[in-house]
Amino acid sequence: MMSATTVLTNLENLTTIFSQINLTSHQQKYLTNFIFRYNQKTQKSKNHARSNRQILADNKSMVEFQLPFKELYYPIVTQQSSGSKIQDIDGNEYIDLVMGYGVNLLGHNPPFIKVAILEQLEQGIQLGSQPKLIGEVANLIQELTGVERIAFSNTGTEAVMTAIRLARTVTKRQKIVIFSNSYHGHFDGTLGKAKSVNNQARTMAIAPGIPANYLADILVLKYGDEQSLKVIKEHHQELAAVLVEPVQSSQLNLQPKAFLQELRQITTDSQIALIFDEMVTGFRIHPGGAQAWFEVEADIVTYGKIVGGGLPIGIIAGKAQYLDAIDGGMWNYGDLSSPQTRTTVFAGTHCKHPLAISSAKAILGHLKIQGATLQQELNDRTSKFVNTLNTYFELEELPITLTNFGSLFGPYTEEKDFDEPSEEESELSLVFDLLYYHLLYKGIMLRGDGGFLSTAHTEADLNHIIQAVKDSISELRQGEFLP
């Protein structure tokens, strides 16, 4: 176990680091003291990271490395979860707002899902054959979302990758449109960003290791912008698909219903596949997802997260015209019918995993019984929670505004045309990072600078979060990080 003396020794170099970012002596003293207290409270998690760093390649230690916070960069190691809370290996309890990055709509470890998984586990994990429950799960998805056909994969990234391949197969075109600030998993074919080169728009890789040829057929446009619709019209003859995150997780305040409806008309007229990536919005904003919310019927929809009940799953769903490219389409026994549609490649050892399918049946059945009331009540509670915090931020004249889309909340943001943050934005980033760790110290686990509410979060939980925010702001002021 790490002693207090060891912690202090590790922090001795912080004074030199802090001096490089122009912190006052009061700020240095405050930050050193906070880091010491945080390390003491979560020392087993820090020791876990230290002992495994050499062998474990893990980007969960931090999002963007900032030297002053080096001694805070380690993931909290958890050992137990239930409802709205999780417990770490130091015995600390946290109100969880990460919620599996949107997976746990009903909180952690719902008893009825646990029962379903254990029942299947007793029957075995049969891979390579058809799970007994697969037809029931497919029918439940169809009933809730209105899609015509469904296929199963393991992850959201796989589902999006397959959706694009189906669109290219059916349309016999290659180019796709994606929108800046969207996230569609880590498939190379979606990891592009728009960049101006010699006053001409180019699609560039967002990170090293992504081959340029994967990006040659990607057109990155501004989401919600009328000019983007004009560009799609201009390129309609070469476009296989337009891939949309209906409400971007990084820009929740942009909820462009009219834009999506006009986009639907343009893609229909030009026989371009409209793909909705509903990993986050699916089954959360409404039982029918963003399609129902925005009154737009996409050609292909990808789902995951909530529908797996906590286990890995990806779903490719949509119109038979596109899904038929997986298996050749409908045919019958007892006659001369046969597959009539050209097919493409689709595979995966763990697709339709019996445990994931059992879990999916349990949660989809629950959502069917509850109806849209479940989502509506949770959406309303989240809006009230966000409004309460915004009222506080405004009264305290803080440069923070939250927004939400249903039960997902985060900062109000605007799309930027440049990559490098200003000096003011860098200073604010430092403060927001500090706020994140102050809340973590107080037992509030955020998803970056936002999070997800679940049906398991109580009013007491929300009141505790609000008070923790107020206390953290007060402490940051005492440390002279806020005026």
Image (cartoon, helix red, strand yellow):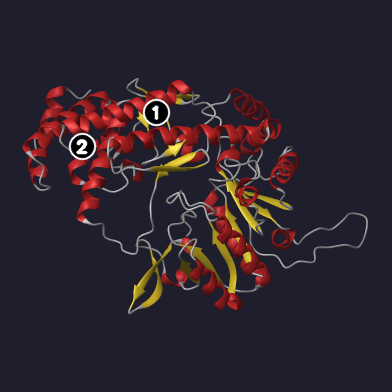
Quarter residue 465 falls in:
top left
The answer to whether one can see residue 348 in this image is no
- Which comes sooner in the sequence, label 2 or label 1? 2
Question: Residue 141, position in %: x, y?
Answer: 69, 43
Q: What's the amino acid at mark 2?
A: Glu
In this picture, residue 321 sits left or right of residue 159: right
Task: Tell me: residue 90, above or below residue 100.
Answer: above
Helix, strand or loop at disc 1? strand
Q: Position of residue 57 (x, y in %)?
A: 34, 45
Q: Which residue is mark 1?
A: 78
The residue sitting at 31% across, 25% down in the picture is 442
Crowding near the residue tagged with mark 1, few <14, some 14–19, many ≥20 C-alpha atoms within 10 Å: some
Q: Quadrant of the C terminus?
A: top left
Residue 306 locus on image (x, y percent): 57, 39
Q: Is residue 261 above or below residue 101?
A: below
Q: Is residue 199 above or below residue 134?
A: below
Distance from label 2 to label 1 (Cα)?
Answer: 19 Å
Q: Which of the numbered marks, if any, corresponds to residue 71?
A: 2
Q: Which mark is residue 25?
A: none
- Residue 147 or residue 331, whichever sits in front: 147
Secondary structure at badge 2 equals helix
The quadrant the N terminus occupies is top left
Which amino acid does the dot numbered 1 rest on? Thr
Q: Which of the pair 92/393 is nearer the observer?
A: 393
Question: Badge 2, how many Cα within 10 Å: few under 14, some, many 20+?
Answer: some
